[in-house]
Amino acid sequence: MADSVLIERPTEGVGLIRINRPEARNALNMEVRKLIAKHLTEMGEDDAIRCIVLTGNDKSFAAGADIKEMAGAGTIEMLARGTHKLWRTIAACPKPVIAAVNGFALGGGCELAMTCDIIVAGESAKFGQPEVKIGIIPGGGGTQRLPRAVGKYKAMRYVLTGDLFSAKEAFDMGLVSELVPDAEVEKRAVEMAKQIAELSPLAIQQAKEAVLRGMDAALDTGLALETKAIQILFSSQDQKEGMAAFIEKRKPKFSGR
């Protein structure tokens, strides 16, 4: 039986995590959730990896939770699974994560994409939070991350109806970072990851943290976080190398120090 999550190194500095349950449209069972959290944690601690791509296959990024696995569960069983802890682990990866989305990104799949920092989607991709159609609500951050990404009224329209929306609609709403032909999704995500991996990992980490921590804080608090982050970076070798390379009109070589 093939591994349900595969690990690849498509280019220097880039790690790729591939959901591999084609027979179930990459539905997120507990095994897949745990493996994604495990691999993201390990890559987050691996100095050789500076950016991560998370993807599925050409038919599905992830078509939601594995309904068969949870249909008969009760409250205590759901509590014991600790799925919410896995979502937090995934979202807490300190390195940039790019979702490369083809096909379906529904329910938990849409929520998984929203834990990432950048979403590259194919033109035929479909997004949605259809949980209300089976008597529940989004439980992996959909009621919180979607409104923050697209605004209350667009989010309510899809959370309360369960309707799907196209990649173009997702792009127009601000959920998708870049829209590309289906055949180019993974290639483009890896190219972008390589571009990020060639930059200072210290600056990238501080930039990601400043954006994420500042989003839910008051503007003054966010600006204070930003100020402290840039001040800290002036103690790094990467800052000295980056500015020297700019002055000398050469490409910098960042060490992450």
Image: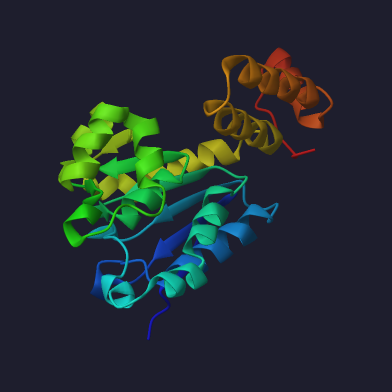
Q: Is residue 174 visible?
A: no
As drawn, the residue found furthest toward the bottom would be 1
List x then y, in percent, for residue 201. Answer: 67, 38
Q: Is residue 185 left or right of residue 232?
A: left
Q: Is residue 176 left or right of residue 140?
A: left
Q: Quadrant of the C terminus?
A: top right
Residue placed most toward the observer, 174 or 202: 174
> In this rendering, is residue 241 above or below 49?
above
Residue placed most toward the observer, 11 or 214: 214
Residue placed most toward the observer, 213 or 6: 213
As drawn, the residue found furthest toward the right would be 235
List x then y, in percent, for residue 121. Answer: 29, 43
List x then y, in percent, for residue 86. Answer: 52, 61
> In this rendering, is residue 244 above or below 160?
above
Question: Which residue is found at the position 21% from the left and 40% from the top?
Answer: 158
As drawn, the residue found furthest toward the front would be 75
List x then y, in percent, for residue 249. Answer: 67, 17
Q: Quadrant of residue 211?
A: top right
